[in-house]
């Protein structure tokens, strides 16, 4: 772990994504149809302001080797992020929109962070700050979503990677993190599938975003595969069900063809338990739940059950 000194980074108060300065008039992540700009207008927040307001990162073990991280009071989307621990290094999957010295110390006690992956752009949070706090840990970004990144280096004075508009992926190919330093970028773009730390699989399956990804980590206690789905494939309130959505806050569905593709994309993976990025859990039967839920979803959006409406 480095001697981290916090940067005065600005985040969008609605989605929690970090931005380079100067910030745009409106957050492009929230202006997209999958999110929203508040009716009261765009709001920004600086890290020091959040610290002064009493924000903190809570860390809770959800099962041996897997910890849930949340910011309280609620900030941005209010996501639950996960620290998946392995003997070869820890993966931070989805990123809190805040970081302070206490959080750095607490995560360091758990072994630190060897790699960072956000399931999709809504979960970028303060990913560069988290990287800087842990020896410039590589931040893996799906190449399909790279245009949504709004901050590329801690020293960047520009707006970041383009406008954040859909399809804006004109970014340099990266084979690994640049040399450490305030002007270097820890961002590493990937295609389809990677192992950010040995034994943890991250796979891009699309859906919510073109680059939306999931992770599968194996429990050190019982050897069971644990599926971290973000918003890509997410457990819901009803036990044994999961869902797939274009937009959760705006209730935009995906097509049956896309949902079929997503379910097929994880059919070869070995997993049983599932976690979503708002703390949802499916404690068993995850693999069967994905297939059964996909079939149900496809039947509804294809009109098979229209007679019930």
Image (cartoon, grey):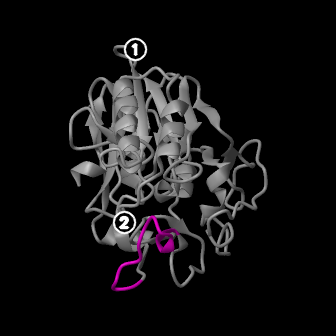
Q: Position of residue 297 (x, y in %)?
A: 37, 43
Q: Nearer the viewer, mark 1 or mark 2?
A: 2
Stretch of the chain drawn in magenta: 29-41
Q: Residues within 10 Å of mark 1 (few under 14, many from 20)?
A: few
Q: Position of residue 261 (x, y in %)?
A: 54, 38
Q: Is residue 85 magenta?
A: no
Q: Residue sitting at 59 percent across and 49 percent down?
A: 211
Q: Which residue is mark 1?
A: 223
User: The residue tagged with tag 1: helix, strand or loop?
Assistant: loop
Which quadrant is the C terminus positioned in?
bottom left
Identify the residue at the far top of this view: 222
Residue sitting nearer the eye, 107 or 201: 201
Residue sitting nearer the eye, 226 or 72: 226
Q: Residue sitting at 39 percent across and 35 percent down?
A: 295
Q: Which residue is mark 2?
A: 250
Q: Residue sitting at 41 percent across and 72 percent down?
A: 36
- The earlier-in-sequence mark between 1 and 2 is 1
Above or below residue 288? Residue 260 is below
């Amino acid at each position: 772990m480095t001697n981290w000194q916090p940067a005065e980074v600005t985040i969008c108060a609605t989605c929690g994504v970090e931005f380079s300065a100067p910030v745009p008039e409106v957050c492009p992540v929230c202006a997209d149809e999958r999110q929203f700009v508040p009716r009261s207008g765009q709001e920004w927040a600086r890290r020091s302001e959040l610290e002064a307001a009493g924000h903190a990162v809570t860390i809770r073990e959800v099962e041996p080797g897997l910890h849930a991280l949340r910011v309280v009071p609620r900030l941005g989307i209010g996501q639950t992020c996960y620290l998946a621990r392995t003997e070869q290094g820890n993966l931070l999957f989805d990123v809190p929109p805040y970081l302070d010295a206490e959080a750095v110390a607490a995560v360091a006690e758990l072994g630190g962070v060897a790699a960072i992956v956000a399931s999709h752009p809504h979960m970028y949070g303060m990913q560069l700050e988290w990287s800087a706090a842990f020896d410039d840990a590589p931040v893996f970004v799906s190449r399909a979503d790279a245009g949504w990144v709004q901050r590329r280096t801690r020293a960047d004075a520009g707006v970041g990677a383009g406008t954040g508009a859909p399809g804006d992926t004109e970014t340099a190919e990266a084979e690994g993190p640049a040399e450490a330093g305030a002007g270097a970028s820890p961002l590493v773009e990937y295609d389809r599938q990677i192992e950010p730390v040995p034994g943890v699989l991250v796979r891009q399956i699309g859906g919510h975003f073109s680059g939306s990804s999931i992770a599968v980590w194996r429990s050190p206690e019982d050897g069971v595969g644990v599926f971290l789905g973000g918003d890509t494939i997410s457990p819901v309130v009803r036990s044994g069900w999961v869902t797939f959505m274009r937009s959760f806050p705006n209730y935009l569905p995906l097509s049956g063809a896309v949902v079929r593709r997503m379910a097929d994309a994880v059919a070869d993976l070995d997993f049983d338990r599932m976690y979503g990025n708002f703390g949802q859990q499916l404690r068993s039967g995850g693999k069967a739940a994905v297939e059964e839920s996909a079939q149900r979803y496809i039947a509804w959006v294809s009109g098979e059950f229209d007679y019930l409406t």
